[in-house]
């Protein structure tokens, strides 16, 4: 007997979906923005080449790149409040892992963008008598930011997908909302298909945009 | 020391770890003089030049440019930060690979020093830049980006960019080596004109005819040291040091006597 699809159940939960999508987008935007700020600060500090500055940053970056994000989320949600001996709001504790994860990759993207600028640009700026700040602001960053944008957009797309891991700590994002609806309706096929479609509809235009950005930088 | 001396270098050394690229070079350049440095590849010419505007920090010796003198044996005399930037601002440098700023037009490149470093009003900087670009024969190319210019044109923009700072001294490091042969002349002509106008310059080059025509003084380096120096005609046509003779023999007879 062929399976009878029934999406009407799914549609009945419209306002749950909207809320779930809103949570997913809010966590994506918030953690991407937080990660960007961390990335710019740490990336800048890495340029200082003093070991006591760079060593802790490298340690941070590698720690977050070399442990699974799922472990990070769970750790910050369950373990951090114990370590700090404070009550952290659940939504906040859940977001820290995602933010620091994005921060680690953003740091690499920022540093990579800066050091990709030809050394001739640095020496020409210095030879003209620019200070470090003038050189960064007028010569290096304008060129480097153009190169940072595509990898940053790509990482943000990955980040949006990664927010689905918040499911394990019961943050009512798109994925978790789906699981709630499934337990209500016992229709996993329709529900999880809808979840996938929702992610796709949001992300596909973003990937197209990222590809366009990349093409622009290459020329 | 007379006011006449623009650059005085004594016992300058620069090591990279175990490699000593410059081993005790001394040199005086008087105001308005053009000094040409020649020598085999890897002998330390670039390193020496980069020490003069402190793109490299020398390991030992003393350096005086204009009024400012620095003793590298005494670390506190080495300028840092803004002070270092100001020191470099008075010295122009042009590189083998042009190193123009690709996100700026030719005009903006030439304006960059006055506007960014000297904080000169844009209109005033633009006037200076337009004059300089016209002078190097690029008056019609002000709005072009570097990628839209030939190598020879880019290098002339780079010279104008350095000159826009009204430097006391210009350094040229093999500025024609990356150019197609037919474009070398246009760049050398600009440099000749600058020399004729009394620009103080130190030029590293393999263009022996340029050296013969323009240099007041030729310095031959080998193994990080000066092995011979003197008037261009003497050094290029009657070299005394065997290492100079060996080096110049590669240019077999292409150096004609000054006509
Ligand atoms: N940043 C550096 N680190 C280590 N060694 C260096 C560095 N820069 C230069 N050297 C070494 O110092 C020596 C002198 O190099 P330099 O570039 O000054 O020579 P050059 O006379 O300009 O040569 P060329 O004619 O090929 O440009 C070489 O042995 C080179 O390998
Ligand atoms: Mg060199």
Image (cartoon, rainbow, N blue to C red):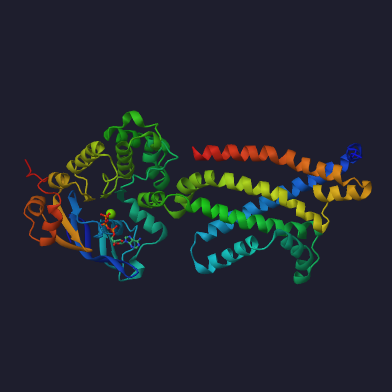
Q: Residue furthest top?
A: B140
Nearer to the camera, A65 or B108: A65
For the C terminus of chain B, the quadrant is top left
List the single residue furthest toward the front: A1
Answer with left or right where residue B195 lies relative to residue B17.
Answer: left
The image quadrant of residue B108 is top left
Residue B229 visible somewhere in the drawing: no
Residue A81 on image: x %, y %: 78, 67
Q: What residue lies at 17% left-to-right and 44% top-to-bottom?
A: B210
Circle count: 0
Between B23 and A134, the one lying in front of the other is B23
Q: From the viewer's perspective, is residue B251 above or below residue B188?
A: below
**B38 in relation to B199, above or below:** below
The image quadrant of residue B187 is top left
Residue B159, percent across and down? 30, 42
On screen, B206 above or below B105?
below
Quadrant where the image shows the N terminus of chain B: bottom left
Viewer can see residue A61: yes
Instruction: Report ligand 1 position as a quadrant.
Output: bottom left
**Where is residue A52 shown, x and y percent of the image?**
53, 69
Examine the rendered structure and indicate whether residue B127 appears above or below residue A149: above
Q: Position of residue B125 (x, y in %)?
A: 37, 38
Q: Residue at x 13, y 53 (%)?
A: B248
């Amino acid at each position: 007997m062929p399976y009878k699809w029934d999406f009407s159940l799914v549609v009945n939960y419209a306002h749950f979906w909207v809320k779930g999508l809103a949570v997913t987008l809010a966590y994506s935007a918030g953690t991407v923005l937080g990660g960007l700020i961390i990335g710019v600060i740490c990336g800048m500090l890495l340029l200082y080449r003093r070991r006591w500055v760079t060593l802790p940053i490298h340690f941070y970056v590698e720690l977050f790149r070399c442990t699974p994000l799922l472990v990070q989320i769970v750790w910050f949600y369950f373990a951090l409040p114990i370590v700090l001996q404070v009550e952290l709001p659940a939504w906040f504790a859940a977001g820290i892992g995602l933010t620091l994860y994005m921060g680690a990759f953003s740091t690499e993207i920022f540093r990579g963008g800066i050091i990709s600028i030809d050394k001739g640009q640095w020496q020409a700026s210095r030879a003209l008598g620019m200070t470090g700040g003038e050189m960064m602001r007028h010569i290096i960053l304008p060129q480097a930011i153009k190169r940072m944008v595509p990898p940053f957009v790509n990482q943000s797309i990955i980040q949006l997908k990664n927010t689905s891991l918040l499911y394990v700590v019961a943050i009512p994002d798109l994925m978790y909302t789906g699981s709630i609806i499934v337990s209500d309706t016992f229709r996993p096929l329709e529900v999880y298909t809808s979840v996938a479609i929702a992610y796709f509809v949001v992300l596909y235009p973003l990937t197209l945009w990222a590809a366009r950005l990349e093409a622009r930088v290459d020329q | 020391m007379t006011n006449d001396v623009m650059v005085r270098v004594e016992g300058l050394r620069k090591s990279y770890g175990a490699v000593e690229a410059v081993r005790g070079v001394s040199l005086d350049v008087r105001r308005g003089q053009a000094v040409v440095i020649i020598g085999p590849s890897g002998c330390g010419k670039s390193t020496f030049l980069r020490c003069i505007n402190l793109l490299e920090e020398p390991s030992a010796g003393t350096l005086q440019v204009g009024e400012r003198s620095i003793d590298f044996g005494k670390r506190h005399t080495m300028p840092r930060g803004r002070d270092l930037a100001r020191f470099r601002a008075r010295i122009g440098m042009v590189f083998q690979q042009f190193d123009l700023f690709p996100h700026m037009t030719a005009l903006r490149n030439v304006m960059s020093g006055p506007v960014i470093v000297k904080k000169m009003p844009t209109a005033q900087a633009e006037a200076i830049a337009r004059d300089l670009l016209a002078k190097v024969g690029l008056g019609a190319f002000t709005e072009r980006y570097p990628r839209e210019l030939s190598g020879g044109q880019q290098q002339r923009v780079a010279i104008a960019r350095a000159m826009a700072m009204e430097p006391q001294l210009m350094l040229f490091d093999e500025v024609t080596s990356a150019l197609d042969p037919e474009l070398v002349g246009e760049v050398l002509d600009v440099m000749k004109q600058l020399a004729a106008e009394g620009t103080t310059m130190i030029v590293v080059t393999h263009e022996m005819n340029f050296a013969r025509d323009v240099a007041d003084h030729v310095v031959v380096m080998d193994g990080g040291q000066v092995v011979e120096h003197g008037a261009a005609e003497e050094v290029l046509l009657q070299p005394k040091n065997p290492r100079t003779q060996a080096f110049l023999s590669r240019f077999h007879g292409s150096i004609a006597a000054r006509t």
